[in-house]
Image (cartoon, rainbow, N blue to C red):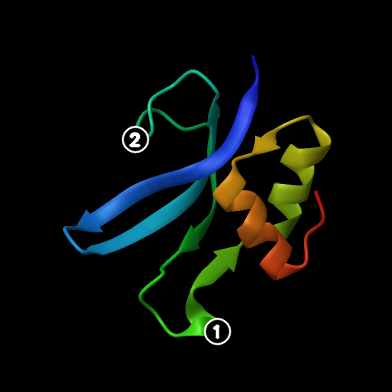
């Protein structure tokens, strides 16, 4: 199974928030997750937008999970190299 770290959308129309999750590469965007590793709230102030469990993210990256393009940018913002 190939895992991918990506965003899962929640919230209402024009008020989104996202959970950063580890999922099977073939599952749909809002499908079953393997693990939730963080949150991303783009509407909040800059310092409160991104909350990550860095230890779990690094663990999944070491086990071969690939981040999506958007998650890759968010991880770089937080200082986690991929």
Residue 53 seen in this snapshot: no
Q: Position of residue 29 (x, y in %)?
A: 38, 33
Residue 49 seen in this snapshot: yes
The span from disc 1 to disc 2 (Cα, nearest Å) is 26 Å
Does residue 18 lie above or below 49 as drawn?
Answer: above
Q: Circle 1 is placed at which residue position? A: 47
Q: Quadrant of residue 63?
A: top right
Does residue 51 lie above or below 48 as drawn?
Answer: above
Residue situated in front as seen by the camera: 11 or 54: 11
Does residue 53 lie above or below 34 as drawn?
Answer: below
Count the numbered circles shown: 2
Q: Position of residue 62 (x, y in %)?
A: 83, 37
Residue 45 as seen in the image, left or right of residue 59? left
Q: Circle 2 is placed at which residue position? A: 30
Q: Residue at x 41, y 70 (%)?
A: 42
Q: Position of residue 10 (x, y in %)?
A: 29, 52
């Amino acid at each position: 199974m190939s895992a991918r770290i990506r965003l899962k959308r929640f919230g209402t129309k024009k008020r989104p928030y996202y959970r950063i999750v580890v999922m099977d590469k073939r599952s749909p965007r809002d499908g079953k997750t393997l693990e939730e590793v963080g949150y991303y709230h783009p509407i909040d102030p800059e310092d409160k937008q991104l909350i990550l469990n860095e230890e779990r993210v690094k663990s999944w990256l070491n086990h071969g999970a690939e981040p999506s393009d958007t998650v890759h940018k968010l991880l770089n913002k937080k200082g986690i190299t991929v």
